[in-house]
């Protein structure tokens, strides 16, 4: 049945596309900073946080760079680069401050519903890897944010930290680990849904599920956002002063539809994932840590293997992976045509160049797709020697779309991380990319506001409020011993976390 288009038009201050952690965070920040702001939220699925923000889809929770070795690459001379790890740790502290503000002001539920303490452990074996971890530990100790980290090569100590990982391991094997008790497990799906539940109760905020954005066009200083109600088939236009495209893997096609010059030349490379999920309660109960190792040669950064204890929907879970794969979908619930339809005249050269420069990655992904159950178990047994096939089942994770961008030297480069693309006039912004995304959402959204709401951010009213929400706003914790100590103490208490030690 054909349905006619709705002629009704609505004007909003802000349109948020996608109901994930990024849109929820930006919506909460803006509503606190300007209570009379009008916000329209559109989500193509029937529930919030069903894609990358969902606990089963998210490749990493509580990313604070304590244990993720891909954030501390080893350079050609053997030294370890820690700048990215320090920046991520700093951003995660900003997130914890904002979440503490939400708790203290009863804007979300109790902290136990979305965050818990759990040790973050980096584990390696082999002489060269042990040397790398020792160097990484020494270098990280130069930063305030990593003080409290422990290092050990003693198998007895490591068995106390992670008994399942050390059980029946070759005693002659050279091993090492670092441990940070300040680590956390964060259920971003639960947090996202709580923030949206709060926003929906506020005046002038409307949330629309099962609505897909079809067109974006700027006209007379406003964005005309054409949306389709997938339930009824009705289409309508919402006019907005500002649009945020926070649709995960779906952001690139929408950025292309906006036709802003700043969005030209971007491409996307989708990487899918799978977990091995433990189904034996006895095994789940024996492991209590996030244990990260080193990625295989050629593996994308989000495929760093880890044996990961999580709390999902109030239950303890144990996952291993992720195993990478390839799909042309940009979203878990997307279309196989997502990748082909994203190729445009302005991005075909960067995409071809990035593809040619990343042939080892392509080969790695093909090999991952071809893995048998026995191959996956072999990888698991490197971290859990006593693993039995009957205790584990395969679970499909979410899609990640890595950013491909223009580069003068190479034509195009594949970037692992997040990229905020904003129009020159600050009227529209899109978030592309993946890890460490969710954990650094607050910092990313503050950077976005500084670009797109610059005058308001600089105003005394917004500055005062920002410092209430994020006490360290405008300062670096890594340069201030007293402030770091005070803020960590406050967030640890408010979020009911375990202090480092």
Image: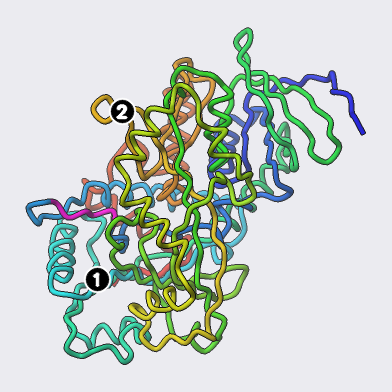
In this picture, residue 122 sits left or right of residue 230: left
**Number of numbered discs overlaid on the protein picture:** 2
In the image, 313 versus 265, the foreground residue is: 265
Looking at the image, which residue is at 32% across and 57% down? 65
Locate residue 407, reporting x and y percent.
Answer: 30, 28
Of the pair 340 and 213, the residue shown nearer to us: 340
Indicate the colouring scheme: rainbow
The answer to whether residue 459 is seen in the rendering is no
Look at mark 2 in the image and give the residue it sits on.
411
* Labels 2 and 1: the sequence-earlier one: 1
The span shown in magenta is: 70-75
Q: Is residue 274 shown in magenta?
A: no
Q: Is residue 186 left or right of residue 167?
A: right
- Asked if residue 253 can be seen in this view, the reply is yes
User: Which disc number belongs to residue 178?
Assistant: 1
Q: Identify the residue shown where x is 22% and y is 52%.
A: 481
Location of the C terminus by quadrant is bottom left
10 Å crowding of disc 1: few (<14), some (14-19), many (20+): many
Q: Quadrant of the N terminus?
A: top right
Image coordinates of residue 58 in percent, x first then y, are 51, 57
Image quadrant assignment for residue 245? top right
């Amino acid at each position: 049945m054909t349905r006619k288009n709705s002629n009704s038009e609505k004007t909003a201050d802000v349109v948020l596309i996608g109901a994930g952690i990024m849109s929820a965070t930006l919506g909460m920040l803006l509503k606190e900073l300007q209570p009379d702001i009008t916000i329209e939220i559109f989500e193509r699925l029937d529930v919030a946080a069903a894609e990358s923000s969902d606990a089963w889809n998210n490749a990493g929770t509580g990313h604070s760079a304590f244990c993720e070795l891909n954030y501390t690459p080893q350079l050609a001379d053997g030294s370890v680069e820690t700048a990215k790890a320090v920046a991520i740790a700093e951003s995660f502290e900003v997130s914890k401050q904002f979440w503490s503000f939400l708790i203290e002001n009863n804007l979300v539920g109790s902290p136990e519903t979305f965050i818990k303490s759990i040790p973050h452990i980096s584990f390696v074996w082999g002489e060269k890897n042990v040397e790398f971890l020792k160097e990484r530990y020494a270098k990280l100790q130069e930063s305030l944010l990593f003080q409290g980290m422990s290092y050990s090569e003693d198998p007895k100590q490591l068995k106390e930290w992670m008994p399942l990982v050390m059980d029946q391991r070759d005693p002659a094997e050279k091993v090492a680990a670092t441990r940070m008790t300040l680590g956390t497990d964060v259920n971003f799906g639960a947090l996202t849904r709580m923030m949206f539940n709060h926003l929906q109760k506020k005046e002038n905020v409307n949330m629309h599920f099962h609505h897909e954005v079809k067109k974006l066009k700027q006209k007379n200083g406003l964005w005309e956002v054409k949306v389709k109600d997938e339930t009824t088939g009705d289409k309508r236009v919402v006019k907005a002063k500002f649009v945020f495209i926070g649709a995960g893997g779906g952001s690139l096609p929408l950025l292309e539809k906006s036709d802003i010059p700043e969005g030209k030349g971007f491409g996307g490379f989708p990487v899918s994932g799978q977990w091995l999920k433990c189904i034996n309660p006895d095994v789940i109960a024996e492991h209590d840590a996030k244990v990260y190792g080193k990625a295989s040669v050629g593996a994308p950064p989000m495929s760093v293997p880890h044996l990961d204890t999580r709390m999902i929907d109030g239950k303890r879970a144990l996952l291993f992976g992720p195993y990478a794969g390839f799909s042309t979908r940009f979203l878990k619930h997307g279309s196989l045509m997502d990748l082909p339809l994203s190729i445009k005249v302005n991005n075909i050269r960067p995409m071809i160049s990035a593809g040619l420069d990343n042939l080892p990655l392509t080969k790695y992904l093909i090999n991952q797709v071809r893995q048998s159950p026995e191959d996956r178990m072999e990888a698991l047994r490197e971290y859990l020697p006593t693993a039995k096939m009957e205790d584990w089942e395969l679970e499909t994770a979410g899609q990640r779309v890595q950013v491909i961008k223009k580069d003068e030297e190479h034509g195009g480069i594949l970037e692992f991380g997040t990229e905020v693309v904003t129009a020159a006039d600050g009227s529209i912004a899109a978030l592309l990319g993946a890890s460490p995304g969710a954990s650094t959402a607050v910092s990313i959204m503050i950077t976005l506001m500084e670009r797109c709401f610059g005058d308001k951010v600089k105003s005394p009213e917004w500055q005062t409020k920002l410092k209430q929400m994020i006490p360290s706003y405008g300062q670096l914790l890594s340069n201030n011993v007293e402030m770091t100590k005070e803020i960590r103490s406050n967030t640890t208490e408010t979020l009911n976390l375990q202090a480092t030690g």
